[in-house]
Amino acid sequence: MPRGWLTAWLLIWVPISLAAADFPAGTIQATGPVYLDGAELKNSSSVTSGDVIESQASGLANMNLVGSTVQIEPSTSLKFERAGLALDRGTLEVASGKQLTVLTRCLRVTPTSTDWTQFNVTRSNGRVHVVARKGDVVIRGESAHRDVLKESKETWRDDGPGCGGAVVRGAVPAAKGPMIDAAMAERAALAASGALLTWIFLQSDDPVSPAIP
């Protein structure tokens, strides 16, 4: 590949790819003890896919996302995923105009439209409580079955460990660093790709040799 074309490709592709991998999905601000990837939040912080959030009994947090806001109630543990918010325990109060999904082990709760929708999801002792506060939400299980929960209605569902859904693990204050997940692996792969391309670029020059002035 000619050096000029390779240089241009490197300058365009690598920064765009790295920005896409690392671009924050939103921000989070805590009141009281709340942990992000094992570190206590002292100020507001960005949140991205793969981040694990845990509020203690006297802590709560607010997340501001594109088109959505989420209040994380005390004693709540969740993981921010590309597919939505994976709730392991506790309560999330969601307001969304972007059909933000809350996932549990067996269920997916999503607004039925892009109209502004407010709903709560609580997971406790293997049970999920869903409240449609404003607008309707659809509840999907592991099968193709789906139910629409109308505005001002609520429902309880079983949420056992054998469903194969997302489970938050390691979201505890004692953790020493962020979890290694798909998002981090993607960033590492992109960095490695950039390094490889840089090496190819350097090898494209004529070698320095005493025989070639």
Image (spheres, rainbow, N blue to C red):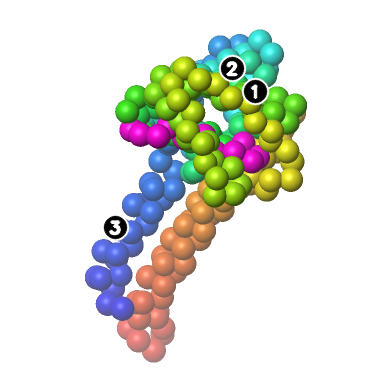
Q: Is the magenta stretch mostly helix, strand or loop?
A: loop
Which mark, by number, is residue 73?
2
The reply to whether the C-beta atoms of the residues labelled 1 and 2 are less than 8 Å apart is: yes
Measuring from the top left, give residue 67's x and y in whole percent.
Answer: 35, 29
Vertical relation: 158 (above or below) 7: above
Cα distance, mark 3 to mark 1?
43 Å
Cα distance, mark 3 to mark 2?
42 Å
In the image, which is nearer the foreground, mark 3 or mark 1?
Answer: 1
Q: Tell me, yes or no, whether the highlighted magenta stretch contains residue 9.
A: no
Q: Earlier in the sequence, mark 3 or mark 1?
A: 3
Residue at the (46%, 30%) spot, across then down: 137
Cα distance, mark 1 to mark 2?
7 Å
Measuring from the top left, give residue 76's x and y in whole percent.
Answer: 64, 23
Q: Earlier in the sequence, mark 3 or mark 2?
A: 3
Q: Tell me, yes or no, whether the highlighted magenta stretch contains residue 109.
A: yes
Task: State which region is magenta.
Answer: 104-114
Residue at the (64%, 41%) spot, across then down: 106
Type of amino acid at the residue the image marks with label 1: Gly
| 167 and 41: which is toward the camera | 167
Type of amino acid at the residue the image marks with label 2: Glu
Residue density around tag 2, few if under 14, some if 14–19, many if 20 or more, within 10 Å: many
Q: Which of marks 1 and 2 is nearer the N terminus?
A: 2
Which mark, by number, is residue 90?
1
Label 3 sits on a secondary structure element that is helix
Q: In which quarter of the image is the N terminus?
A: bottom left
